[in-house]
Image (cartoon, grey):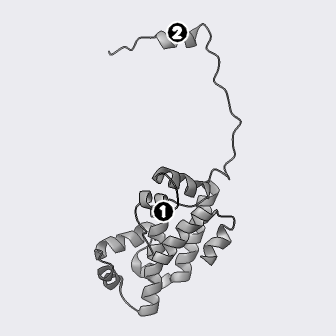
Amino acid sequence: MVAIRSVRPQMRLRARAVIEAVLLSKGPIGSAQVVARAVGLSNRFQLARLLEHEGLPPLHRMTEWVTVLNWVESAEREHVSLCWMAFRCHRHPSACYRLVKKVTGHGWEEVLDKGSPWALRRFLSELRVWEKQSPQHRATPARRLPPVAAKGRAAQHHRARLRLS
């Protein structure tokens, strides 16, 4: 959590609560709808907007990363295979290997060779990318009002018939 706070120090309470729950559970914490209700939001769409506004990835992406980080740290600490961890977590091993590849862009053996510090740096760099894509950091273009409909081509366009030929 310290590493995430260093990247996103101004995070609001609800967003911080979601991240801390994901980190404490070391992965999935439930559906987006359940999490939204748990933090006092009406639905999963409000949760998605909250995370986006805070410059965070969607809930599923965050849980994927935390899951992979947990696996790497466990493999380093306990010297166990991903297959063993998959069975322990009631997951299919091939799905775990695919998840590692999807999240990191590298296979399990390569990720394990690079180590947990490398994986954490990749996660934090992805958080920085999400932060740059957040609505707060986008340049807000000047609002343009729609042109006033006038006689001529624009007015005729509304009355134009659809031709199916």
Asked where in the image residue 109 lies, by quadrant, the reply is bottom left
Determine whether, in the image, residue 95 is placed left or right of residue 138: left
- Nearer to us of marks 2 and 1 is 1
The C terminus sits in image quarter: top left
Q: Which residue is mark 2?
A: 156
Q: Extreme bottom residue here?
A: 78
Q: Where 158 sits versus 76, above or below?
A: above
Give the residue displayed 69% in from the left and 39% down from the top: 141
Q: Quadrant of residue 72?
A: bottom left
Q: Position of residue 150 (x, y in %)?
A: 62, 10
Mark 1 and mark 2 in contact (Cβ < 8 Å)? no
Q: Is residue 164 or residue 87 the one in the foreground?
A: 87
Of mark 2 and mark 1, the one earlier in the sequence is 1
In the picture of the structure, the residue carrying the numbered disc 1 is: 38
Vertically, is 102 above or below 149?
A: below
Q: Secondary structure at mark 2?
A: helix
Amino acid of disc 2: Gln
